[in-house]
Image (tube, helix red, strand yellow):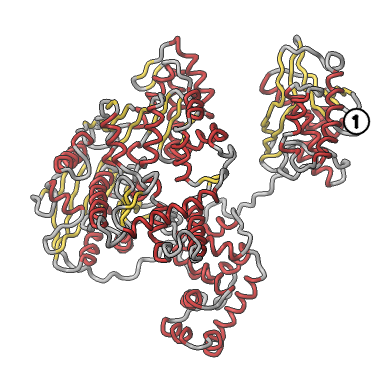
Amino acid sequence: MKIRVASAGTGKTASLVLRYLALLASGIPLRRIAGVTFTRKAADELRVRVGEALEDVLSTGCHLDFVCDPVSRPRFEEARRELSGATLTTIHGFMIECLRRTAPLLSLDPDFSLIGDWEARAFFEEEWRSLLYLSSDPAHPLFGQAKPEMGDALLHLFAKRSLALSYTPSPGEENAVLVKVYQAVFANYSRRLGSSLLSPSEVERRALELTANPLALGRLLDRYRAVLVDEFQDVNPVQGEFFRALESAGLPIEAVGDPKQSIYAFRDADVEVFRRALAEGEVLPPLATTYRHSRILVRFLNRLTEKLAALGLGFGPEEAPPVEGVREVQGRLEVHWVEGEVTLDELRTFEAQILAERLRALSERVDPSEMAVLVRSRNSFAFLEEAFGRLGLPYVLLQGRGYYERLEVRDLYHALRVALDPRGLSLAAWLRSPFGGLGLSEVEQILRSDDPLALLQAEFPEVYARLRLIQQTVSQSKPLEALKFLVRAPIIGGRAYLDHLQARSRENVDALLFQVAARPPSGLEVLLERLQLLSHQAEAGDVPQSGEGVQLLTVHAAKGLEWPVVAVFDLGRRNPHLSQPAYLGPDGTVALPETPFFDELRAQAKAREEAESYRLLYVAASRAKDVLLLTGSVKAGNPEGWAEVLAKVGFGPEARFFDRSDYVQRSWNYRPLPPSGPPAPRPAPVAPPWLERVFEPLPLPPLFSPSALKRQADLRGEHEPLPLPDLEEGEEVPGRSRALGTVVHTAIAQGWDPDYPAHLATLEAQEVMFPFDPAERESILAEARELLRVYQALLGKELPWPRDEDYPELPLALPGGSTVWQGVMDRLYRVGEEWYLEDYKTDHEVLPERYYFQLALYRQAVREVWRVDPRVRLVFLRCAQVVELEPGVLERALLQNIPG
């Protein structure tokens, strides 16, 4: 494997694009190159950048420092044509494509479906509960071993299965039992998925299995001749083994990444995969020129990485090459510390005020929307929002985690739950929410009574009546309608629940309605179960705020982004560590609490988190282009977290005071802020000119087909209903006529012989034939055979034969008025200098007027795109009749049916 280290801002994407150009110039077609990166957004950007580079090469002969040999120009023209279908995708996307290409060899359904992590967890949890129940039978092999208290550890192992192909128990009977039970549950889970369902982790495991199958691997080697991998520092161990196996099999892998930016351990990324590639592979020269940073920031980042690498904090010297800047901008670095003997929260309040004042001063030169404040923890946002609000500094909180645990989402969950069962915690939550509006003491009084609902009716009749109304309405409504009622109905003192929410919460509720509408659950219990399961999915973000202003976001969310001005707030926050129900070693070793290796594995996990925290600091600092502000709070002269790191580098609270135009280093003594008055009222928004505009409905949908238009006419009674709907319209269960039409059109397009048994067997295997029993299939095939014989009898007589050019089943998309018309031409072909456009019909009657508009569209598309005017003919197979349509008839049909 070829591997390259590329620091932040050094042009990783540009280097990948240049590799694409070099590979194309060497003779490797674009369709034989796989471009793989970490996110869909990055993959889309790479596709755009490759497309721009191809345009540069074809128009100017060069791109950056790549110069195209004129002899290889046809290769780049071919690449431009192939770009839309080229493999430029995520790691999972690439694995999925590999699996679909080789699915039968792996006992997989080629049309396998994907499920999300939360749904996979739900399946696993159900299998665990089933096993727990079954193992209570003394005859069960796990009797006495599967225990309810194992649940958290089992779910943890399941969530971390991308870290190891298999788990090994460390010494201790409890660990051996845990792994044994996990293997049993996972086996049941795998059987449940079968060959047609895969979650992201199962995609990885199946892809690795693929590399052990010589036939499947050979198919991939035939398909691809090079794989380019971006952000290689973010791959997990199973993904790393997959690429390593491809390389060992002879498929060249080129990877680029930055181990200093490996910050996704919570997604199972492991920087050791990159380090192993560095140790075993061919190390290419690092990218050492930054195109992002100002001069002062280049110096700061070099010093930061040099010191951390020398101390072994997060990365080593070989992973942190010094970089040179090319920008002439001097830039600015500010480091501000707040010190005092008060609580850290009080220090952070003052720290946020200092930062807000500095950003307000900078806003005279830089628009606030070009600034970002990065934090390590979302708990820091509250201090920033208060300070920005006090100064009237506009800001936008981009996106937080835990959408399904947001108070407004849980309010609606509990409202639905009490509609089904008004007891327990859901009743308590509902009474405290805007729906109930009761205080804690009142809720406690109700819940402690022997009959809570009777007491609620006696003490709070209005709240009780509201509960009964919700129960009655929700029980009689579909899930989406029930949600809309809870959100919008004015049942809370004449106001709706939505009226009690702030703007951000309203956006989250709207998002919930859209989500339920997009995937309607079959019933209320299904919706409640889905919401409960999703509440465990901490990575689901809430809806980003709209508007302009300073952007507030976490460092993880800022990865891959850049701003002219960046501030990193709350440097003094200590490194967190959330205890785990079981700890894993790098080799998949498992240890439970109070077993021999538990403390050792926990210490290793903490060390990995500590190392990642140093890399996280580098990611935060390297987001700035021109100006970087660093602020932190230090209590009693004891720096913690990133403050301690910067102190080691020489930028801590004890550093010398500086106040230069490009560098400020200052410590502030804490002082309490005066109480702030109410925020100034915002000016009334100016109504945009389009607010009152009414958009009239279009005469036809934006995307439509002549077949759909024809069916509308049939419904209006303008034509008799057609026995054969068009093939591209919908997914309805086919009737006999549609099945007959499908097999006839397929056979004509393929040029199959109606009297050749293998061809007939293939027609019988078409999906459209599945709903019919053997006798019906035989009847349809017999009728199709007769129609195909008619078609063959017409060849060389009414239908010209042989043909010089032949294009069966030609798709089209033709803009016409406000609609794009889509369809499939049965056949376009050329004999000599004459072009023919034909459409084959299995109708019982010869009524060509039904198809005037359809054929007019097809003719118009051919004229516009191919610049030829074909003779248009309808072939009615039952009657062995060919009807040629006059151009004038077709042009009138086009004018009559396309509005405007």
Q: Which residue is mark 1?
A: 846
Quick check: 498 above or below 360? below
Q: Quadrant of the N terminus?
A: top left
Asked if residue 409 can be seen in this view, the reply is: no
In x, y percent, where is residue 47?
A: 46, 31
Residue 295 shown left or right of residue 181 in the figure: left
Taking depth in this image into account, of 579 and 443 the one nearest to the observer is: 579
| Element assignment for label 1 | loop
How many labels sit on residues?
1
Q: Quadrant of the C terminus?
A: top right
Outermost bottom residue: 458
In x, y percent, where is residue 113?
A: 56, 44
Residue at image point 25% right, 59% down = 352
Quadrant of the image occupied by residue 692: bottom right
Disc 1 packing (10 Å; few <14; some 14–19; many ≥20)? some
Asked if residue 309 can be seen in this view, the reply is: yes
Quick check: 564 above or below 126? above
Amino acid type, mark 1: Val
Residue at image point 52% right, 78% down = 423
Quick check: 798 above or below 132? above
In x, y percent, where is residue 381?
A: 32, 59
In x, y percent, where is residue 733?
A: 75, 45
